[in-house]
Image (cartoon, rainbow, N blue to C red):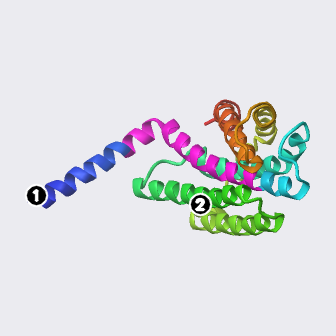
């Protein structure tokens, strides 16, 4: 009898949370955006560290163009992840499935990010970051397939490329300015690799706040 009551209580709680998420979709959008943000940050930081290792640039005015390749690839990645997942407008059917997806994206992003920071701290060679890049892309393709996004069909919907690009470019300017200021004018660490990545985290937080607001209001409007 107690087990039955426990199952009913668990089911009721799950239904209540599902109802809240369906009523206030911005909650799930924000959670998914945060998980995708981990992916995008990881891609951005990965390419930044590759470029820094390749050209020996970790601060100064040149940090802007070193920051560009990572931003560009993360931008492309961000568009498709946000369009097909964060702002897709799908109803919450399975709370467990949504939770597992959030965890999967977050864990992969954090693990890869940890490898990047470890390499930067020890002044790894460009080939190290290149190897991580290949693994990271393969992991994303596996997740994309397992989430069923290859089967998704949004071709009939409006393609908000221009508004997405404008919002993202403003985000890039915010990111690069904060990165320049933190790495050039603040003494974040005596280790140049650590200083670069600490500055990048601060810059990313600033640009992500703008990006979520911009995407929500101007790009993926539902």
- Residue contact between numbered discs 2 and 1, judged by CB atoms under 8 Å: no
The residue that disc 1 covers is 2
Cα distance between the residues tagged 2 and 1: 40 Å
Q: Label 1: state its secondary structure.
A: helix
Residue 156 appearing in the image: no
Which residue occupies 70% across, 35% down?
Answer: 207
Q: Label 2: state its secondary structure.
A: helix
Which residue occupies 76% across, 39% down?
Answer: 164
- Image mark for residue 85: none
Which residue occupies 68% across, 31% down?
Answer: 210
Q: Residues within 10 Å of mark 1 (few under 14, many from 20)?
A: few
The residue that disc 2 covers is 111
x then y, percent, for residue 54: 88, 58
Quadrant (top left/top right/bottom left/bottom right) for the C terminus: top right
* Magenta residue check for 38: yes
x then y, percent, for residue 120: 73, 56
The segment highlighted magenta reads 18-46
Residue extending farthest to the left is 1
Judged left or right of residue 17, residue 148 is right
């Amino acid at each position: 009898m107690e087990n039955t009551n426990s199952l009913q209580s668990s089911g009721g709680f799950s239904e209540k949370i599902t109802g809240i998420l369906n009523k206030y979709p911005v909650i799930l959008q924000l959670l998914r955006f945060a998980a995708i943000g981990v992916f995008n940050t990881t891609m951005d930081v990965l390419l930044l560290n590759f470029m820094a290792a390749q050209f020996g640039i970790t601060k100064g005015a040149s940090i802007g163009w070193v920051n560009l390749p990572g931003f560009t690839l993360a931008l492309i990645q961000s568009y498709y992840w946000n369009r097909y997942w964060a702002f897709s407008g799908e109803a919450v059917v399975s709370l467990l499935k949504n939770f597992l997806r959030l965890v999967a994206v977050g864990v992969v992003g954090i693990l890869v990010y940890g490898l990047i920071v470890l390499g930067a701290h020890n002044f790894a060679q460009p080939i190290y970051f290149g190897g991580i890049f290949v693994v990271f892309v393969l992991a994303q393709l596996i997740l994309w397939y397992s989430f069923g996004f290859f089967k998704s069909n949004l071709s009939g919907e409006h393609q908000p490329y221009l508004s997405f690009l404008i919002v993202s470019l403003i985000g890039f300017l915010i990111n690069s300015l904060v990165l320049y200021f933190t790495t050039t004018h603040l003494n974040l660490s005596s280790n140049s690799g650590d200083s670069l990545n600490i500055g990048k985290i601060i810059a990313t937080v600033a640009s992500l706040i703008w990006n979520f607001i911009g995407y929500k209001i101007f790009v993926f409007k539902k």
